[in-house]
Amino acid sequence: MSSGQQIPPWLQEQIMKLQQSQQNLQSIMAQKQQLDLEQIESERALEELRKVGETDPVYKHAGAILIKSTKAALIAELEEKKELANTRVAVLAKQEARVKESIKEQETKINEMIRGGQKPGPQ
């Protein structure tokens, strides 16, 4: 296509779909990164908690305050939080793979449309 030509509406639509998929991928990757940080934070907290004696007082955050708890309860809570984060990361990884595959297909389709210069058939 020459620089003087307008982009056909059918091609604009495909490009917009591609951009939406790319934004979706960025969102998924940001969520995964946040979960990775949560996992690291939980692991560090568990390491420190395991150093504490069984009878030593321990506290957990509840908003802007600290609440006294037990070492066992906090360990169980942190382990559950880590497990939940692991599950969410696995789900996001599958979503990421599907979106990346979709982006590849969309890019191929757009390139074929540009080379062919014609409107695609029904989807």
Image: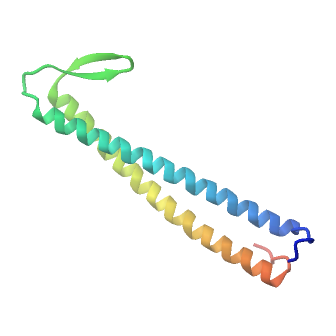
Taking the spot 85% from the left edge, 76% from the top edge, the residue there is 119
Residue 91 placement (x, y as % from top left):
44, 55
Residue 48 picture quarter: top left
Extreme-front residue of the structure: 3
Taking the spot 50% from the left edge, 53% from the top edge, the residue there is 29
- Colour logic: rainbow
Extreme-bottom residue of the structure: 116
Q: Nearer the viewer, residue 39 or 80?
A: 39
The C terminus - image quarter: bottom right
The N terminus - image quarter: bottom right
Q: Nearer the viewer, residue 51 or 97?
A: 51
Left or right of 60? Residue 16 is: right
Residue 107 placement (x, y as % from top left):
67, 72
Residue 104 placement (x, y as % from top left):
61, 72
Left or right of 41? Residue 6 is: right
Residue 116 picture quarter: bottom right
Residue 52 placement (x, y as % from top left):
11, 29
Left or right of 10? Residue 103 is: left
Q: Nearer the viewer, residue 123 or 86?
A: 86
28 shown above or below 100: above
Left or right of 107? Residue 59 is: left
Taking the spot 74% from the left edge, 81% from the top edge, the residue there is 112
114 shown above or below 93: below
42 shown above or below 31: above
Taking the spot 91% from the left edge, 68% from the top edge, the residue there is 6
